[in-house]
Image: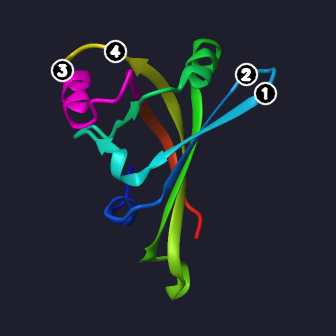
């Protein structure tokens, strides 16, 4: 599902926005492209230092929207820069091998946000 162009974007720094929501309101949390780890089965792991609002949202609704991009990667029709919108499900993990691996890279984390993409769309 994840494309070569998506992986190209992850080679450069850019802002990643993670949107969670409940019937009450949406919430956006940001991180950096360089903080994303993609597993062999295409789950995305993100160190979560805060994410307390997202955690409350995910307890009610595990759906997420994620956007990311990089100016350095060529987009459609030769335009400078491209970006993606992912939809998927998410949960926070606080133990296990993957948690330990991400914690070793990012000691500041409290939990790891695991996203399982269900769709991906290149936007630019």
Instruction: Please indicate whether residue 101 sits to the left or right of residue 59 in the image.
Output: left
Q: SS of the residue at dot 2? A: loop
Please name whichever residue, 8 or 119, is drawn nearer the observer in this view of the structure: 8
Please name whichever residue, 74 or 102, is drawn nearer the observer in this view of the structure: 102
Instruction: Please indicate whether residue 59 sits to the left or right of residue 41 in the image.
Output: right
Q: Quadrant of residue 13?
A: bottom left
- How far from the left and from the top, in percent, is residue 100? 20, 23
Mark 2 surroundings within 10 Å by alpha-carbon count, few (fewer than 14), some (14 through 19), many (20 or more): some
Residue at coordinates 42% horizontally, 33% vertically from top-left?
116
Mark 1 surroundings within 10 Å by alpha-carbon count, few (fewer than 14), some (14 through 19), many (20 or more): few
The disc placed on residue 25 is 1
- Magenta run includes residue 106: yes
- Magenta run includes residue 42: no
The disc placed on residue 97 is 3
- The reply to whether the C-beta atoms of the residues labelled 1 and 2 are less than 8 Å apart is yes
- How far from the left and from the top, in percent, is residue 122? 53, 62
Measured in 3D between alpha carbons, the distance from the residue under mark 1 to the one under mark 3, in whole angstroms, is 33 Å
Q: SS of the residue at dot 3? A: helix
Please name whichever residue, 109 or 57, is drawn nearer the observer in this view of the structure: 109
Measured in 3D between alpha carbons, the distance from the residue under mark 2 to the one under mark 4, in whole angstroms, is 22 Å
Q: Which residue is mark 2?
A: 22
Going from the N terminus, do you reach mark 1 or mark 3 first?
1
Residues rendered magenta in the picture: 98-114
Measured in 3D between alpha carbons, the distance from the residue under mark 3 to the one under mark 2, in whole angstroms, is 30 Å
The disc placed on residue 94 is 4
């Amino acid at each position: 599902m994840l494309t070569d162009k998506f992986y190209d974007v992850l080679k450069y720094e850019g802002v990643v926005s993670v949107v969670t929501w409940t019937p009450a309101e949406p919430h956006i949390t940001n991180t950096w492209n360089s903080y994303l780890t993609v597993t062999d089965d295409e789950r995305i792991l993100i160190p979560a230092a805060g994410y307390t609002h997202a955690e409350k949202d995910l307890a009610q609704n595990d759906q997420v929207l994620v956007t990311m991009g990089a100016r350095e990667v060529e987009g459609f029709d030769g335009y400078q820069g491209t970006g993606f919108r992912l939809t998927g499900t998410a949960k926070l993990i606080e133990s296990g091998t993957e948690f330990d691996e991400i914690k070793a890279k990012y000691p500041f984390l409290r939990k790891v946000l695991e996203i399982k993409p269900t769709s991906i769309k290149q936007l630019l």
